[in-house]
């Protein structure tokens, strides 16, 4: 069974940059559709970006042009490069994976079975 461990979160000012990583163990990341989700206090968990087995990516409208998802299958690691950060990007960021997720569900939490514990991102104005 795959295990996911996120890292790279922190506190930055608006306009700053962070790079999140998600280490995959127990199974090769190349076998999975993977995604990043985030959850702000008092709000539902929302999809940020996904990447398919074939490398096809999807993004939430709120992060398009600012965030980039990538997957290093050699090192079994998922990344999220976050630029031009805004206070509304604040939240706990989670990595998720599953063997097959239809494209229309790749930004919905219900599409994924495996989750990491999350890493906190705080953006101040």
Image: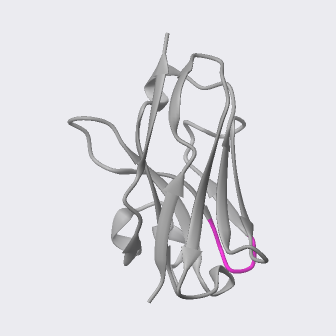
- Is 106 drawn above or below residue 123 in the view shown? below
Q: Residue furthest left?
A: 42
- Percent across and percent down for residue 104 are 50, 69
**From the viewer's perspective, is 19 left or right of 109?**
right
Residue depicted at 36% across the width and 64% down the height: 109
Q: How is the image coloured?
A: one colour
Residue depicted at 32% across the width and 37% down the height: 40
What kind of secondary structure does the magenta stretch mostly adopt? loop
Quarter of the figure with the N terminus: bottom left
Question: Which residues are drawn in magenta?
Answer: 51-55
- Percent across and percent down for residue 2 are 48, 83
Residue depicted at 72% across the width and 69% down the height: 56
Residue depicted at 74% across the width and 73% down the height: 75
As for residue 81 lying within the magenta part, the answer is no
- Is 75 drawn above or below residue 36 in the view shown? below
- Percent across and percent down for residue 102 are 52, 78
**From the viewer's perspective, is 90 left or right of 34?**
left
How many numbered marks appear? 0
**From the viewer's perspective, is 54 left or right of 48?**
right
- Percent across and percent down for residue 125 are 49, 9
Q: Residue furthest right?
A: 74
Q: Quadrant of residue 110?
A: bottom left
Nearest the viewer among 72 and 60 is 72
């Amino acid at each position: 069974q795959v295990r996911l461990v996120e890292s790279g979160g922190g506190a930055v000012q608006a306009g700053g940059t962070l790079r999140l990583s998600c280490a995959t163990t127990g199974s090769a990341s190349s076998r999975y559709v993977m995604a990043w989700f985030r959850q702000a206090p008092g709000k539902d968990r929302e999809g940020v970006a996904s990447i398919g087995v074939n490398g096809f990516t999807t993004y939430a409208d709120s992060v398009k042009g600012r965030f980039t998802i990538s997957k290093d299958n050699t090192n079994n690691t998922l990344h999220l490069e976050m630029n031009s950060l805004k206070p509304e990007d604040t939240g706990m960021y989670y990595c998720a994976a599953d063997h097959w997720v239809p494209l229309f569900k790749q930004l919905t939490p219900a599409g994924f079975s495996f989750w990491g514990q999350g890493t906190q991102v705080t953006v101040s104005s």
